[in-house]
Image (tube, rainbow, N blue to C red):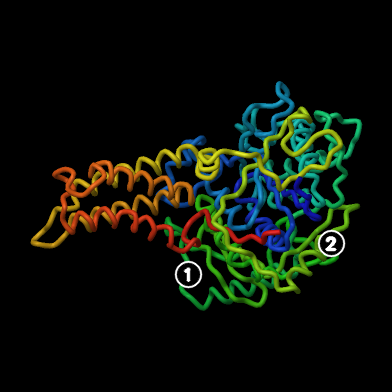
């Protein structure tokens, strides 16, 4: 039996990237301190804007954009050290009362800095989904995970995005439903969440950080968006978003510098939504990034905890502060973010336990070796990894003896191809993908040699053929030795 961590944080956000932009520092600090961190994302951001020109085609294809943003989110959560993730429509409950897919509602600008609902939001848009239905789904997750703290958007949704505002309402209602023993929810035991947190930034600190950012960047050439637009810093004296609150509404603040590198790396993974990410060793900020509106935003040096009325964030603040004082450091890991446990309306079938038994959110369903590979890289990633290894191994075997003016061009191209396939497989599907590509490449080289040099006209009993047969697996080993920070499967998390 797995023992529950003492502190468990469940973060609920509307779209991929909201978790990093709004609370990346808090999630990373929590994971670093040994807090069990789960994240629920309400939509896949199908209607989000796309910044990079090379990805502009995604804006016209909502399904393709959704898949791309899913991958961005997985990589970002791995950087932050989250332990599991779930999209809200993956909760197997309330069938017949909810859409099979919960989609991004889109938005329109009501005035500069304030968004409103899009006029063409469909019936399966998150913002149009009945609060009690969406909250019922989230309440199932709360009863499974049994968080000691729930984090979500503040009432204004940051800048008024309808999905952000709805995420706040849905989370508040879900906390009520999860605590109500009269709500059956498949027989899961009621769970009163001790602490509810809202994303926040302390206003005076934010204004000072904006001024510092403007002053720092003002001493350098201006930064530009991919389309040539000059990126500018928000006016420190101007109107702030609803995230900015007076110091009296902030329970505590914690130094974010120990996880600053992780937060910036996570931001870079959200490439469709974020640009110009860069570190700054400032007095009130550790970096900055740009949004699609060409505005540069500081990454503050401190995380600010804002408790909802009636909640007390002091326990979580003490955990985060104590970990910082103890000098705890995250342990690098190439493991992908664990998928959310399979949830069930039937307590006997629930992978986290049912009835009144305590849930065990750190336990994962058992899988075979292939199941683990598919879970880490996705079915498509597994297939691409195998195919890349087979193709590059076969092509290298065919061309490895080719010379150009006496130079061994063939073996150089062959080994470069195997290395490229292995690196691509690792980037797409993590360590499991790399292993599959390596097995495929080495297997096909051996098969085409009839398992021995000199077995056919392609692989002869010559030094260059021996170099090829031994060089191919060494190229795969080289791919495995590349720095983990170059890949999306890299994360830093504290193991407990």
Decide which of 58, 224 is in the foreground and name it. Answer: 58
CA distance separating discs 1 and 2: 35 Å
Decide which of 369, 65 is in the foreground and name it. Answer: 369
Decide which of 316, 264 is in the foreground and name it. Answer: 316
Quadrant where the N terminus lies?
Answer: top right
**Numbered disc in front, either 1 or 2:** 2
For residue 316, which quarter of the picture?
bottom right
The residue carrying pointer 2 sits among few (fewer than 14), some (14 to 19) or many (20 or more) residues within 10 Å by Cα, namely: some
Q: Which mark is residue 222?
A: 1
Q: Which mark is residue 306?
A: none
Looking at the picture, how far across and down is residue 438, in whole percent?
Answer: 38, 49
Is 234 situated above or below 433?
below
Task: Name the residue located 71 percent from the left edge and 24 percent from the top edge.
Answer: 95
Looking at the picture, how far across and down is residue 260, in whole percent?
Answer: 62, 67
Q: Which residue is mark 2?
A: 249
Look at the numbered disc 2 and give the secondary structure of its residue: helix
Looking at the picture, how far across and down is residue 412, in whole percent?
Answer: 23, 58
For residue 56, which quarter of the picture?
top left
Looking at the picture, how far across and down is residue 398, in whole percent?
Answer: 19, 46
Residue 235: tell me if it is visible: no
Task: Name the residue located 45 percent from the left edge and 41 percent from the top edge.
Answer: 382
Left or right: 67 with respect to 479? Answer: right
Toward the left, the furthest residue is 405
Decide which of 179, 357 is in the foreground and name it. Answer: 357
Badge 1 or badge 2: first in the primary sequence: 1
């Amino acid at each position: 039996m797995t023992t529950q961590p003492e502190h468990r944080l469940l973060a609920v956000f509307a779209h991929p990237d909201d978790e990093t932009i709004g609370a990346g520092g808090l999630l990373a600090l929590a994971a670093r301190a040994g807090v069990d961190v789960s994240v629920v994302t309400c939509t896949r951001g199908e209607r989000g804007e796309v910044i990079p020109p090379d990805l502009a085609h995604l804006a016209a294809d909502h399904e393709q954009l959704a898949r791309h943003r899913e991958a961005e989110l997985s990589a970002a959560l791995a950087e932050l050290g989250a332990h599991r993730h779930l999209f809200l429509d993956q909760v197997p409950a309330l069938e017949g009362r909810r859409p099979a897919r919960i989609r991004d509602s889109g938005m329109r600008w009501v005035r500069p800095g304030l968004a409103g609902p899009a006029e063409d939001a469909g019936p399966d848009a998150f913002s149009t989904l009945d609060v009690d239905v969406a909250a019922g789904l989230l309440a199932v997750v709360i009863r499974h995970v049994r968080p000691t703290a729930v984090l979500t958007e503040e009432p204004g949704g940051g800048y008024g995005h309808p999905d952000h505002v709805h995420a706040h309402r849905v989370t508040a209602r879900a906390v009520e439903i999860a605590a109500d023993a009269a709500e059956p929810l498949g027989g899961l035991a009621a769970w009163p969440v001790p602490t509810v947190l809202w994303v926040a930034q302390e206003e005076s600190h934010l204004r000072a950080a904006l001024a510092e950012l403007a002053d720092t960047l003002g001493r350098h050439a201006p930064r530009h968006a991919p389309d040539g637009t000059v990126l500018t810093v928000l006016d420190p004296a101007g109107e702030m978003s609803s995230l900015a609150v007076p110091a009296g509404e902030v329970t505590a603040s914690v130094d974010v510098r120990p996880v600053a590198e992780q937060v910036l790396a996570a931001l870079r993974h959200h490439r469709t939504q974020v640009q110009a990410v860069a570190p700054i060793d400032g007095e009130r900020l550790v970096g900055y990034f740009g949004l699609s509106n060409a505005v540069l935003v500081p990454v503050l040096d401190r995380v600010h905890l804002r408790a909802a009325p009636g909640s007390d964030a002091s326990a979580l603040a003490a955990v985060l502060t104590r970990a910082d004082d103890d000098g705890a450091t995250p342990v690098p890991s190439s493991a992908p973010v664990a998928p959310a446990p399979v949830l069930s309306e039937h307590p006997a079938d629930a992978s986290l336990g049912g009835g009144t038994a305590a849930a065990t959110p750190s336990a994962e369903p058992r899988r075979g070796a292939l199941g683990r590979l598919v879970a880490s890289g996705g079915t498509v990633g597994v297939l691409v990894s195998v195919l890349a290894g087979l193709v590059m191994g076969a092509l290298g075997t065919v061309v490895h003896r080719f010379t150009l003016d006496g130079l061994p061009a063939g073996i150089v191209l062959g080994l470069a191809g195997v290395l490229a396939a292995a690196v691509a497989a690792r980037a797409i599907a993590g360590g499991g993908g790399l292993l599959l590509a390596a097995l495929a490449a080495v297997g096909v080289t051996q098969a085409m040699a009839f398992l021995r040099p000199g077995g056919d006209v392609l692989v002869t009993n010559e030094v260059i053929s021996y170099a090829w047969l031994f060089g191919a697996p060494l190229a795969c080993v080289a791919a495995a030795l590349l720095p983990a920070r170059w890949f999306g499967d890299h994360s830093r998390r504290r193991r407990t």
